[in-house]
């Protein structure tokens, strides 16, 4: 059975480990707007909602609208589903935390490449 938009959004919130309020704010919407979608009161969100969620969280717009395809997608890049999810979660971090992750990755690369 195909999942509803509310079920897909619930899944996305869980996968990103983000609260409804934060998710809505990052996408540029109110928590009440998101709540209406999640509880089925608002059956057809605006095109701007779909575009904002897809852009902000690196979500595949086809999956968001219809449930078809992989959950995460990074435009212009061919990534595995797990890599795209990692990019989406990285985008949720504040700049200071992104800098820490970048330093860790650079250190691991130096170690791996033997430099």
Image (tube, rainbow, N blue to C red):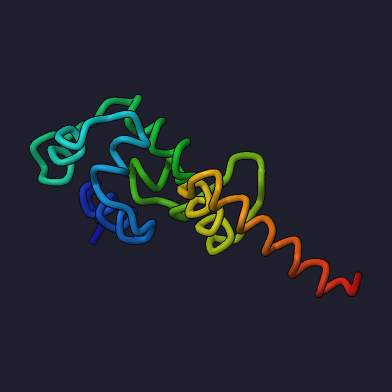
Relative to 67, 89 lies left or right: right
Q: Quadrant of the N terminus?
A: bottom left
Q: Quadrant of the C terminus?
A: bottom right
Q: Nearer the viewer, residue 11 or 109?
A: 109
Q: Position of residue 12 (x, y in %)?
A: 34, 54
User: In the image, what residue occupies the spot 67% across and 55% down?
Assistant: 102
Q: Position of residue 77 (x, y in %)?
A: 66, 46
How many marks the image carries: the answer is 0
Q: Position of residue 5 (x, y in %)?
A: 24, 46
User: In the image, what residue occupies the spot 61% across and 58% down?
Assistant: 101
User: In the image, what residue occupies the spot 13% across and 34% down?
Assistant: 42
Relative to 87, 69 lies left or right: left
Q: Position of residue 25 (x, y in %)?
A: 31, 35
- Residue at the extreme right of the image, as rendered: 115
Relative to 107, 90 lies left or right: left
Q: Nearer the viewer, residue 15 or 51?
A: 15
Q: Nearer the viewer, residue 20 or 38?
A: 20
User: In the image, what residue occupies the spot 62% across and 50% down?
Assistant: 99
Which quadrant of the figure has residue 105?
bottom right
**106 in relation to 24, above or below:** below
**68 in relation to 114, above or below:** above
Q: Nearer the viewer, residue 99 or 85?
A: 99
**110 in relation to 40, above or below:** below
């Amino acid at each position: 059975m195909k999942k509803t938009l509310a079920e897909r959004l619930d899944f996305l919130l869980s996968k990103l480990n983000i609260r409804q309020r934060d998710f809505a704010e990052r996408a540029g919407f109110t928590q009440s707007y998101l709540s209406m979608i999640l509880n089925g009161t608002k059956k057809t969100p605006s095109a701007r909602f779909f575009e904002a969620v897809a852009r902000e969280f690196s979500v595949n717009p086809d999956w968001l609208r219809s449930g078809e395809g992989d959950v995460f997608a990074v435009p212009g890049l061919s990534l595995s589903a797990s890599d795209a999810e990692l990019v989406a979660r990285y985008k949720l971090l504040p700049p200071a935390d992104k800098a820490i992750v970048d330093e860790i990755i650079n250190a691991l690369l130096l170690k791996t490449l033997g430099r």
